Amino acid sequence: MTEPICPCDGPHIIAPSNLPGLSHIAYRAGTFADFRRAVLTPSAGEHSLSLNGVPVWRTDGAGDLGVMVAEWFAYIADILTFYNERIANAAYLRTAELPESVNHLIALLGYRPRPAIGAAGVLAALVTPGQVTLLPKGLRFQSKPAPGQAPQIFELSRDTLIGPPDQIPAAPPPVLLAETPGVSPWVRRSFAYRAISRSSLDLGWIAPIGWWVPEGSHGLLLQGAITDIDPGALLLLRPRDRSIGQPLLATVQKASAGPAPGGGQQTTLSFTLSDTPPDGLTAANTTLEKSSQTGSLWSLFSGAISGAHVHMAGLTRQIRPGDWLVFSAPGRTALLEQVASTSEAIWDANGTTAAPTVPDGDKPAVPMPHTVLTLDDALPSGWNSIAGSITVSFGWRQAGTLKDQPFASWKGTPTALAGTGTQAFPQLLDQPILLQDQAGNGIEANGSSGGDASLTLAELPDPVPSLQPPFTVLPNVLPVSRGKTVANETLGSGDAANPAQSFRLSQSPVTYLQQGSSWASTISLTVGGQAWTEVANFYGQPPDAMVF
């Protein structure tokens, strides 16, 4: 041969080079193309193949038998070098790719690799009302497979007693008030201010209509479309049980009616409260009330307010001891006061002082009977000077039917749940339960209950997935594991003269289950009626040890 088969051919094959620490060993000396090129390319100084000066082989490369023989050799060399490289990589832990290669290597050290751990889980049992049943260990359950998949078999891990109740509706404790995001002080300062009263130095400000809610406001819901509550209205938020707590004065900022999520109409109120509301307010234990009557104070001459004594403009016998009154005036923060006692007095309407019947010059005396209120606390001193502009609200009536706030997504808090049906929780002491939300999602947890309508959760997953109340609590929890028990299998007969014997199970693989931080197989072996113990290896075991 006097020229290469193709211009890219060359006579040399470059040997592979491997640096330390690589994840793959390059052991192939070449590929089919490398070996073909090396065989068909003349060596250095070789110009022709001849015998006694007569050329014996010259080819144009098309259909030549000599070229075919060279290609057969390149084909065999390609296969051999490919598998040599695979064998070289499988011979080291760092470069081994197949699990069986790793197992063969570590078996030289007597190491036993961790087995695959069988799936374990929990099921919830639903029972016939009135029946209590003991389910035996090993009871089988079959999964409902997806199309094209085989069913999976699970077995009960221990004897389990089940009975009613099996499904208890529950939810987080109801909440009446919603925190309404307000406008922070630095945002308020960005608006224009204007003076309302130069004498009192009160400031007001202009806000966009329809969305502004003061910082620290609350919100609540009323059933139906309520049209007689306007911004600025003064309402009482109070416990239904009048013997506990005192009312909170609510100043309405916004009222709007709209469709309710479950159909119909509802009214949303935004308001500020005179004090921090107590915990545990619900629609069931709270009422919202509005005033049905108003009155004014004595204004013919000064003296309407004297400490805790307040003189009304006339007889107001509807007000009784123990009643709550709201005193309001333009430019002043409304006051909530309770009546300690009531009485009546007569003053001269034509007079200038509290003396009832002393004529003043030619003016005849006009006796004016009126109601005198004695309050639990005295009104602020500055209110005496504006007695003529004060309005007293009383005669409180229900403003509407309250609704609890809709359930928000639940992520583990609060951990106390309340039953929402007629069924009580069974008596539980930190026992496993399943909690399922309305979408069918759920978690496993531990629950405690005294057999009433309250349930306390513990051992929640971390993190808790977002669940949407209301919930269904499932207390009949069945621990199960993947696999099917093979009972009473005879492995064979042993030979005491043979120190190394092994027997193969008729079915595989063996199920291994998690046991603390380690694992354990589910094999139970007896030899001659004696139970043998499974060990990881035989190192250090005496000759008569009953281990496998």
Image: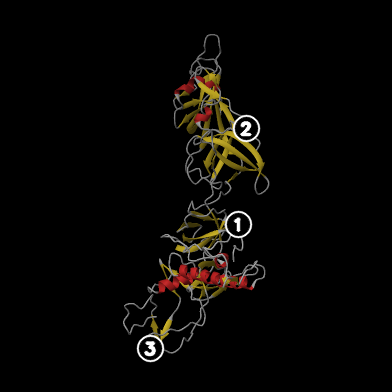
Residue 178 at x, y = what percent? 54, 42
* In-front residue for pair 389/15: 15
67 left or right, relative to 379: right
The amino acid type found where label 2 is placed reads: Gly
Residue under pointer 1: 439
Q: Bin the neighbour count of mark 3 within 10 Å (Cα to Cα): few under 14, some 14-19, many 20 and up.
A: few
Q: Which color scheme is applied?
A: secondary structure
The amino acid beneath tag 1 is Ala
SS under mark 1: loop
Residue furthest to the right: 264
Q: CA distance from mark 1 to mark 3?
A: 62 Å
Q: Which mark is residue 498?
A: 3
Mark 2 lies on residue: 210
Looking at the image, residue 432 lies above or below residue 355: below
Q: Amino acid at mark 3?
A: Asn
Q: Are marks 1 and 3 in contact (CB under 8 Å)?
A: no
Q: CA distance from mark 3 to mark 2?
A: 93 Å
Name the residue furthest front.
Answer: 52
Mark 1 residue crowding within 10 angstroms, few (<14) / some (14–19) / many (20+): few
Q: Quadrant of residue 299?
A: top right
| Element assignment for label 3 | loop
Are there few (<14), some (14-19), or many (20+) residues within 10 Å of tag 2? few
Front-lying residue, 48 or 147: 48
